[in-house]
Amino acid sequence: MKLDGIYSQAMSGIQRGLGSARQHAAEIADAGRPGSDSGTNLIEPMVGLKLDRLQVQASSAVLRAYDSMLGTLFDKKA
């Protein structure tokens, strides 16, 4: 895989995780409103938030590895 592909995948994973976290947070916030149709089932959005956190952490780890690898390549080239 090309290096730019790794970067794109990592950034995409972070964006997906953050977008999903926003959605799950909105579901949790909506569940407490009187008259909301979402009911009181908070288990799914709370588990979803944990998964979103793991997604962002894993993608961030890939991004850090990419940065380190790129730095090593530049050091060897110099």
Image (cartoon, rainbow, N blue to C red):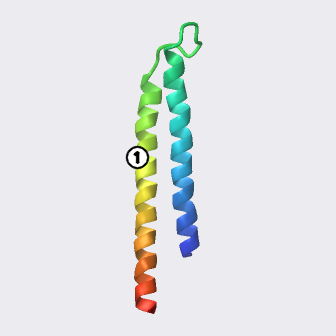
Question: Can you give x and y, in whole percent of width and height, for residue 17 in the image?
Answer: 51, 45
Q: Which residue is mark 1?
A: 54
Question: Can you give x and y, in whole percent of width and height, for residue 2 in the image?
Answer: 56, 75
Residue at 42% over, 29% down? 46
Residue at 50% over, 38% down? 21
Residue at 45% over, 85% down? 74
Decide: is 55 above or below 34.
below
* Farthest-out residue, top: 35
Classify mark 1: helix, strand or loop.
helix
Q: Is residue 1 visible?
A: no
Q: Is residue 25 visible?
A: yes
Quadrant for the N terminus in the image: bottom right
Quadrant for the C terminus in the image: bottom left
Decide: is 10 above or below 78.
above
* In the displayed structure image, the side of residue 49 where residue 9 appears, left or right: right
Q: Nearer the viewer, residue 77 or 12?
A: 77
Task: Give the mark count.
Answer: 1
Decide: is 42 above or below 73.
above
Give the amino acid at mark 1.
Answer: Leu
Decide: is 55 above or below 7.
above
| Mark 1 surroundings: few (<14), some (14-19) or many (≥20) residues within 10 A | some
Question: Can you give x and y, in whole percent of width and height, for residue 20 in the image?
Answer: 54, 39
Question: Can you give x and y, in whole percent of width and height, for residue 19 in the image?
Answer: 56, 41
